[in-house]
Amino acid sequence: MDDRGKCASCPSICCRYITQKIPTPRARADFEHLLWQVSHEGIEVYQDEDGWFLLVHAPCAHLEASGACGIYTARPPICRDYSNDFCELDEPAERHFRAHFRDYDALLAYCRKRFKTWARTA
């Protein structure tokens, strides 16, 4: 499938979330802050080869019901420059995650393993 065909047949996956690179969490306080963040609906945390990221499930305000961009000709540069060379239609992004925390409980379990004294000092 050519690149244009790939986007034409896609349900606009890349327009339904954003990711934000975050500093690598090292200290307990860093993880406590992440626990607060993943306590919010639509927020996940993951680590891949490029570092740590917040994943925010929030569809673009300009995404039309058809999946088309409502401001396509005036879309932001990040959208204009986006390449579908790595596309989730080809392979799920999760396949490349080293760690993925979908919610509070998943991250808390990781914290308890990483910080042996977590339960005693919480």
Image (cartoon, helix red, strand yellow):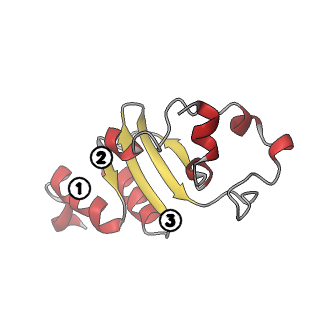
Q: Which residue is mark 3?
A: 42
Give the quarter of the figure containing the C terminus: bottom left
Q: Are marks 1 and 2 in contact (CB under 8 Å)?
A: yes
What amino acid type should be assigned to the residue bearing mark 1? Answer: Tyr
Closest to the observer: 28 or 58?
58
The percent position of residue 103, horizontal first and vertical second, equals 36, 65
Label ID, residue 99: 2
**At 53% from the left edge and 56% from the top edge, which residue is drawn?**
56
Q: Secondary structure at mark 2?
A: strand
| Count of labels in the image | 3
Q: CA distance from mark 3 to mark 1?
A: 19 Å
Residue type highlighted by circle 2: Ala
Q: Residue at x 34, y 38 (%)?
A: 96
**Which residue is denoted by mark 1 in the rendering?**
110
Dot 2 alpha-carbon crowd within 10 angstroms: few under 14, some 14 to 19, many 20 or more: some
Percent position of residue 110, x then y: 23, 55
For the point 61% across and 38% down, the residue is 5
